[in-house]
Image (tube, rainbow, N blue to C red):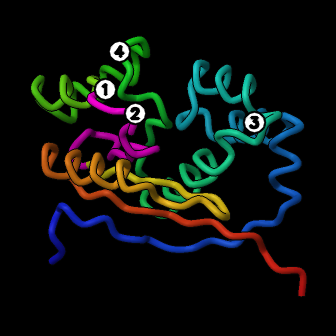
Amino acid sequence: MRCMTEISKIQTFEVSEKRLTQWKSGQLVRDWAAQFPKLFDELDVSHAVSVCGKGKLFWEWLATILLHQATGYFSLVTKYETTSHKRKRRVLEHLFDQDVCHYLTRRASRALAPDLLMYAAVHSDCFFCEVKGPGDQSQLEEMRRFTEVAVKTGKSIEMIQFRWRSNR
């Protein structure tokens, strides 16, 4: 059994650059939101639409879908540590005690919590997931924060890495 303070890599997935182009056009945001309404709420969609043209949130949404399909878990996609998102806050409060919720919502540094919080439908289990697109590297401050999160919550932090599919 691995230590809860370790960050382990789940898998590396290959992705066609065409998918990112579809995301930037806004088409995948709409398609995925319609296909997976229990994964992405209106605030997630609104936020994604506002940044998709820059390619932001693509990797996080793709990881959410892949993890949901593999585990059946649902996801809080980014910004779940903010207090302004009421639904995400309610899920946090079901998963963790008040002390942990307070810890997750404070910003002691520029490093944020891991990108995703994956959780079972009945709130019986959860884990964090950090998502890295092609060329993304983990930063030392980020890894320290993730180790703190794992220790404080007692939950594992997994990592999904994406790379571009080679045209063979």
Foreground mark, 1 or 3, reads 1
Looking at the rendered image, the quarter that the N terminus falls into is bottom left
Question: In the visual, does 24 lie left or right of 43?
Answer: right
Residue receiving disc 1: 107
Number of residues whose C-alpha sits closer than 10 Å to that of mark 3, classed few (under 14), some (14–19) or many (20 or more): many
Number of residues whose C-alpha sits closer than 10 Å to that of mark 1, classed few (under 14), some (14–19) or many (20 or more): few
Residue receiving disc 3: 29
Q: What segment is highlighted magenta in the picture?
A: 108-125
Number of residues whose C-alpha sits closer than 10 Å to that of mark 4, classed few (under 14), some (14–19) or many (20 or more): some
Q: Earlier in the sequence, mark 2 or mark 3?
A: 3
Foreground mark, 2 or 3, reads 2
Q: Are marks 2 and 4 in contact (CB under 8 Å)?
A: no
Q: Position of residue 5 (x, y in %)?
A: 19, 61
Q: What secondary structure is marked by label 4?
A: loop
Q: Earlier in the sequence, mark 1 or mark 4?
A: 4
- The numbered mark at residue 62 is none
Q: What secondary structure is marked by label 2?
A: loop
Q: What secondary structure is marked by label 1?
A: loop
Residue receiving disc 2: 110
Q: Are marks 2 and 1 in contact (CB under 8 Å)?
A: yes
* Picture layout, residue 70 above or below residue 103: below
Most common secondary structure along the magenta stretch: loop
Q: Position of residue 115 (x, y in %)?
A: 46, 44
Residue receiving disc 4: 83
